[in-house]
Amino acid sequence: KKARGPKSDPRQALYDTMRMKTASVEGGSVPSIFNFESLFPEPAFLDDLVGTAGASKSLGNLTLAREVEGTRRKRKGVSVPPPTVKRPPPVVPAVPAAPVERPDPLAQTAKKPVVDRILTRKVEESVYGMVRRNEPNPSAQGGVLSGSNLDKNGPPPAVKGAGSKTVLYDYSNSLLDPDSAVQFRDGVRLGRPLKVNLDRLTYHARRALGRSNLNEAEDLYNRALAVDPTDGRPYIGLSRVVSRRRPTDTDTPARILRRGMRNCPDNAHIPTALAFLEERRGGLSAAEDLFRQALRNSPRHAAAWVGLGQLRTRKLMQGPAAGRACFRAAEAELVKAGDPPSSHVYTAWAGMEYRQAKDYARARELFGLAIRVDPRCSAAWLQLGVMESDRGNYDRAEDCFESILTFDRRNSRALQAYAIMESRNPDGDSRKAIGLFEKALDVNPRDAGVYQAYGLFVADCGDIDGARDLLRRGTIANKKHPAVWQAWGVLETRYGSPEDGRDIFQQGIWIVAQRSGGQSGGRRCTRLWQAWGVLEAAQGEHAAARRCFNRALDADKRNVPAITAWALMEMGLGEVDEARAIFERALRQFPSPLSEGKMALWNAYEAMETKADNASASQAVYNRSMRDSFIQPAHDSLTQPADERASSTDLQPQSGEKSEDTDNFQWKVPGEGTMEEGEVWYREGAIEGKMPSWKRPRRKPNQ
């Protein structure tokens, strides 16, 4: 007790007192704490602890007291009931009265703060980097932007305001961190949204479009537009959705892409997509302008360079030089920007060298570069295999096609090209070719090109009915494929009746015709008109043949097969002057320098004169073609490097200055085909000549 001091535990003191009392009753011996009652005391209920007079007594003290009392009763053998405890009545807490509200005199006299709305708006626009403007609400015309309800001239979808106005946000650079500048007002987010939200929406939209779930893809692209109307990916995606849903409708995708160009003026992908669409619609000049606009927005955009090069070489017939300029410029811009080389550029370049320039060594080298950049580039392997097959290297072609099938077994184009190679190979297996065609149809049952090649192969094998059935199935799989209609019509012309061939050509023209093609139906119908004209010429209906050839040239004025067939028909009828006029009119449609189509026309023109036993006219045609081949293409500001453009302006003499270079004039040299006393050399690819001494002006001795 002295160690504990005056502040000893009262419960311990009570316990010691009770033990001493028990020891005096039982003869001075203290009971052990390990007896039965101590180890297994009687339970204490909560009712006995709450509300008693000794409520301050702890649970342990009450248990010990009951233990001592029970021991005493057992010793005396007297049954004594336990003491009863009176419980006090429960205490009900009083409920405080509600406070009386009294008016605050200070609150009545306080005035609302005056907010300068104009200054607040300026501060918000500076902080969050946006400019708001009110324009008519496009929701009255159909709501959000989509392929089905698209306002042609209205603004893009934005936040709906009061009345018939819409608040449009033009985002710029914010003064805050883009990750932390997330503010909302009236349920509308202020500032530029996070890019990860757009990436997520466009990713799932592309997956839905790949699964042909057009409704889900359209909904996701519309949600992406609502998040940020200045992102170009939703516009391109919506145009693809509409093209999938209505393949013949090209106006709605064009309006969607033009809307995207207005909202994203610096985007290069939208003009490129619109250029490909315009090329498909037949607007070649508009497509070229759009490709150039895309390259002005982003000079390192490889898809725009490839599209421009293929447009100029395939459709505009500007020759391989124009294509090389585009592909070289694309390669230089990628190096300048620090980007890796593009296999797409090398593949397109190699295809141009192979098909148009006939430079197989250069094409093989470029295909190797494309495969080195991307060993899994199916397009490069496929075109290389086709080139080797055309050259007769069937083993190399087979290796190329097998390389594709190792990592892309469901490539229907590779299977089709592999089957065609087997059908052309003298040592090939026809059963293997048929098996490859069947695999290609299993992979893509709606590929009309496979049906066309398969049908022609079966016709060569002698099964005309089987070929006719395959070509008919091809027209059902893809009604807009003109090559299948042409092959079916030619098959009926050769092995059937001319009336069936005419009916097939007419049905194909009606189905394949474009809306903006006029009476001829557009460029897609050119081959059908040409084949129909050949049919009429073979049947002796020359007037009908002339109408068909005229329609073919109206659809495509540079179609070499139609021009050649018409001229040869007139030559066969003895109309030599008319045949020459056809060739002369066609040659004026082809620009210089010499392109593949123009070279084919010169060769056909020369062969016609040779067949007519007119040697002098044939030689004249040959000389004209050679002169045409030496004409250099006009320089393009886009394809010419920037340093060369600067140097070319510096090399030109200014006004008042004399150039030290030799004066180059045109003169007539005595003797045909010679350049007497004239020194000839090459300068920047052009032939130049120094003026002969006999043509120079002589000075007088006194001068």
Image (cartoon, rainbow, N blue to C red):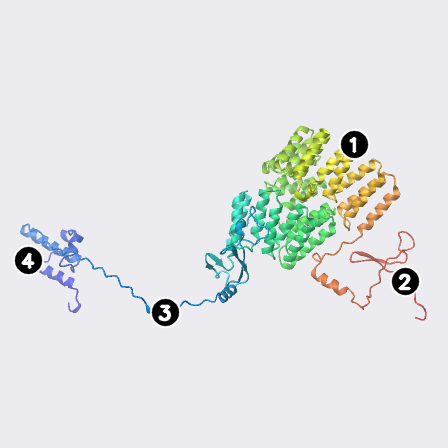
Circle 2 packing at 10 Å, graded few (<14), some (14-19), many (20+), is few
Circle 4 packing at 10 Å, graded few (<14), some (14-19), many (20+), is few
The residue to which callout 2 is attached is 696
Amino acid at dot 3 = Thr
The residue to which callout 3 is attached is 109
Q: Earlier in the sequence, mark 1 or mark 4?
A: 4
Q: Secondary structure at mark 3?
A: helix
Q: Quadrant of the C terminus?
A: bottom right
Tag 1–tag 2 contact (CB < 8 Å): no
Q: Secondary structure at mark 4?
A: helix
Q: CA distance from mark 2 to mark 3?
A: 106 Å
x, y (%) of residue 316? 72, 48
Looking at the rendered image, the disc whose residue lies closer to the viewer, 2 or 4, is 2
The residue to which callout 1 is attached is 540
Q: Earlier in the sequence, mark 2 or mark 3?
A: 3
Q: CA distance from mark 1 to mark 4?
A: 148 Å
Residue 599 seen in render: yes
